[in-house]
Image (cartoon, rainbow, N blue to C red):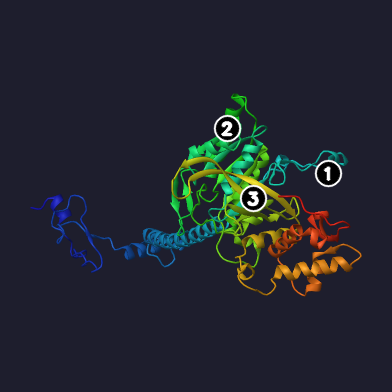
C-alpha cells in the first residue's frame, strides 16, 4: 500500500527526472550549503551552480542588469584598476626621471654661478635702499684725506706689490711708526715672526702700544713656495680682529685704529673651490669686501702682494695673479730693487684714481740686529729712509727704469786712452747749446739736437759732471714745475759747495 508521502516523492511518467548538465570547462562548481564534500559529484536531490564570470555577465545582461560601460574592454573593475595603477606607476617613473634630470641641470647651473660669482640673491625691498642726493653744500665738505700723503689714503684699500727682498714690509712698518702719534695699527702676517714685527715698530720710532699683531700660521704654499693659505681667513676673522683692536686701543688710551696691514692678502684668504688668486672675479670679490670694511670702519687697509718675474708690456702686469690685484684698488704700487746701489730700492704707482703717477727711490737702514757675524752681513730689521718723490708719468717711469735696468760697463773703463763716453758727449752738447741759446735748454731740446733718447741714468751722470766742473762749464741746473729740469748759463761761474 502506498502512502501520500511516497506518492509525492515518486516521479510521474509525465515529468521524468533529468540529470544535471555537465559544467563548462571554463567554469567552476560551487557546492551549495549542506552538500557533500566531494566536489566532483552532486548529491541526490541537489543542483550545481556555475561561477564563470563571462556567464555571470551574460546572465546579468539577460536579466536586465546591463554591464558598466566605463569598463570598456576590461572584464571587470578590478582588472581596470590594476591597469590604471600600472599606468600611473609608469607615468610617475618618467616624471621622477625628468625631475631628477632638471634638478641635476639646476645644480650644475648653481655650481657654475658659484664659480663665476654670478649668484643672484632675491631682490631687496625698496624701502631698505638709502639714497643720498647731490646738494650744493656737499662741495664745501668733501675732501680727500690721507693717513700719510701720498701713500696711504684714508678709507681706502692700497696694494704694495713687489718681488721678495724689496723691503715692502719695512716700507709699511716705517709709515706705521711715522703715523703712530695719531694712528694705531693692526698687523696680520704669515710672512714674519710676531716678535720681529713688534720690535721693528718700536725701533723705527713707533709709539709704544700703538701696534697690535694678530698671529696667523701659514698652512699652504704654491709651486714657487709663496704662502697661499693659513689658519686666518679674511672673510671670517678680519672684522672681528678690527673690532677687538678698536676696543683694546680705546681701553688703553691709545690713538684710534687707522691702519690695517695684511702680509699677504693671498695667504690670509681661504680660497673656496672654484676661486683662486688668479681669478679676477674672486679677487674683485675679496677687494670689494676689504673696501667695504675700510669705509665702514674708517681705515686704510694696506696689503702686500708678490710680483712676477720677467718683462711685461704693461707696467701693472708685473704683479702676480689676477690683474684685479692692481686694477681694483684705488691706489697700487710696485716695488723693485735699485741695481745701482746696495740696499736701495724704488717704488712707483701702478694704478691710481687719486693722484697723478709718481715714484720714489728709498733705502733701508738697520734698526735692530737679530744676529751679528764677524764675517759676513748681520741679520737685521730695517726701517726705510725715503728719497725725493718724482711726479709725472714719464718722469716716474724714467726713475723706475733707470733703477731696474741692468748697468752697463761700457763707459766705466778708465784704463788707457778711451773714446768719449755718452756722458762726455751729452755734456759737450749741453754746454754748446747753453752758450748759444737765448732761453733755458731742456732735456728734450738736447735729445733732439743729440739725435737719440737719453735715459735717466745717463742724465744723472751728466748733471753730476756739470756740477763737479761748474767753474769750467758755467752751466746751472734748475728744477721747475713737476721737477722739470732746465739748463742755463751762469753769469759768474763758481765752485760748487762741498758734498
x and y percent of residue 2 in the render? 10, 53
| Disc nearer the start of the sequence (3/1) | 1
Residue 383 placement: quadrant: top right
x and y percent of residue 379 in the render? 48, 45
- Residue denoted by label 1: 134
Residue 60 placement: quadrant: bottom left
Question: Would you say residue 240 is visible in this rendering?
Answer: no
Q: Is residue 279 left or right of residue 69?
A: right
Compared to 229, does 255 lie above or below?
Answer: above
Circle 1 Cα neighbour tier, 10 Å, few/some/many (<14 / 14–19 / ≥20)? few
Q: Disc 2 versus disc 3: distance between alpha carbons?
A: 31 Å
Task: Please give the name of the residue rendered at 66% of the width and 62% of the height, measured from the top-left corner.
Answer: 402
Q: In the drawing, what numbered circle is on residue 245?
A: 2
Task: Please give the name of the residue rendered at 60% of the width and 56% of the height, measured from the top-left corner.
Answer: 341
x and y percent of residue 165 in the render? 54, 53
Furthest residue in direction front, as rendered = 416
Furthest residue in direction right, as rendered = 438
Kind of element beneath mark 2: helix
Furthest residue in direction left, as rendered = 1
| Disc nearer the start of the sequence (2/1) | 1
x and y percent of residue 285 in the render? 60, 51
Question: Would you say residue 418 is visible in this rendering?
Answer: yes
The mark total stands at 3
Kind of element beneath mark 1: loop
- Residue denoted by label 3: 362
The one of 337 and 18 positioned closer to us in this rendering:
337
The reply to whether dot 2 and dot 1 touch (C-beta < 8 Å) is: no
Q: In this view, does 454 lie to the left or right of 106?
A: right
Front tag of 3 and 1? 3
Amino acid at each position: 500500500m502506498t502512502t501520500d508521502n511516497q506518492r509525492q516523492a515518486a516521479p510521474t511518467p509525465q515529468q521524468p527526472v533529468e540529470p544535471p548538465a555537465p559544467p563548462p570547462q571554463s567554469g567552476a562548481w560551487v557546492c551549495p550549503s549542506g552538500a557533500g564534500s566531494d566536489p566532483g559529484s552532486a548529491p541526490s536531490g541537489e543542483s550545481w551552480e556555475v561561477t564563470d564570470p563571462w556567464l555571470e555577465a551574460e546572465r546579468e545582461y539577460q536579466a536586465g542588469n546591463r554591464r558598466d560601460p566605463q569598463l570598456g574592454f576590461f572584464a571587470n573593475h578590478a582588472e581596470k584598476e590594476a591597469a590604471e595603477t600600472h599606468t600611473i606607476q609608469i607615468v610617475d617613473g618618467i616624471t621622477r626621471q625628468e625631475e631628477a634630470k632638471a634638478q641635476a641641470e639646476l645644480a650644475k647651473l648653481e655650481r657654475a654661478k658659484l664659480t663665476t660669482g654670478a649668484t643672484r640673491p632675491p631682490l631687496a625691498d625698496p624701502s631698505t635702499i638709502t639714497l643720498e642726493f647731490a646738494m650744493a653744500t656737499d662741495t664745501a665738505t668733501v675732501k680727500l684725506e690721507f693717513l700719510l700723503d701720498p701713500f696711504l689714503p684714508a678709507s681706502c684699500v692700497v696694494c704694495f706689490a713687489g718681488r721678495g727682498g724689496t723691503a715692502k714690509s719695512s716700507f709699511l712698518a716705517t709709515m706705521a711708526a711715522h703715523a703712530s702719534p695719531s694712528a694705531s695699527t693692526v698687523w696680520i702676517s704669515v710672512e714674519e715672526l710676531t716678535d720681529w714685527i713688534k720690535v721693528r715698530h718700536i725701533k723705527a720710532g713707533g709709539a709704544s702700544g700703538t701696534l697690535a699683531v694678530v698671529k696667523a700660521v701659514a698652512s699652504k704654499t704654491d709651486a714657487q713656495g709663496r704662502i697661499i693659505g693659513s689658519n686666518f681667513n679674511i672673510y671670517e676673522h678680519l672684522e672681528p680682529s678690527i673690532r677687538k683692536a678698536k676696543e683694546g686701543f680705546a681701553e688703553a688710551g691709545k690713538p684710534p685704529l687707522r691702519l690695517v696691514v695684511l702680509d699677504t692678502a693671498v695667504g690670509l684668504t681661504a680660497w673656496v673651490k672654484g676661486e683662486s688668486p688668479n681669478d679676477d672675479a674672486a679677487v674683485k670679490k675679496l677687494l670689494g669686501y676689504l673696501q667695504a670694511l675700510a669705509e665702514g670702519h674708517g681705515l686704510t687697509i694696506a696689503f702686500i702682494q708678490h710680483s712676477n718675474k720677467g718683462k711685461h708690456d704693461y707696467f701693472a702686469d708685473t704683479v702676480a695673479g689676477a690683474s684685479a690685484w692692481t686694477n681694483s684698488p684705488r691706489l697700487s704700487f710696485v716695488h723693485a730693487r735699485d741695481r745701482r746701489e746696495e740696499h736701495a730700492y724704488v717704488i712707483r704707482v701702478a694704478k691710481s684714481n687719486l693722484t697723478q703717477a709718481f715714484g720714489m727711490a728709498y733705502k733701508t737702514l738697520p734698526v735692530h740686529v737679530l744676529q751679528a757675524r764677524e764675517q759676513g752681513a748681520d741679520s737685521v730689521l730695517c726701517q726705510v729712509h725715503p728719497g725725493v718723490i718724482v711726479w709725472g708719468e714719464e718722469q716716474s717711469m724714467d726713475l723706475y727704469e733707470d733703477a731696474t735696468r741692468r748697468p752697463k760697463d761700457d763707459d766705466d773703463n778708465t784704463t788707457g786712452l778711451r773714446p768719449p763716453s755718452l756722458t762726455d758727449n751729452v755734456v759737450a752738447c749741453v754746454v754748446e747749446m747753453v752758450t748759444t741759446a737765448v732761453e733755458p735748454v731742456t732735456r728734450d731740446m738736447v735729445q733732439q739736437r743729440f739725435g737719440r733718447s737719453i735715459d735717466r741714468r745717463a742724465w744723472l751722470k751728466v748733471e753730476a759732471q756739470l756740477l763737479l766742473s761748474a767753474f769750467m762749464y758755467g752751466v746751472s741746473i734748475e728744477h721747475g714745475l713737476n721737477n722739470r729740469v732746465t739748463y742755463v748759463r751762469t753769469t759768474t761761474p763758481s765752485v760748487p759747495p762741498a758734498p
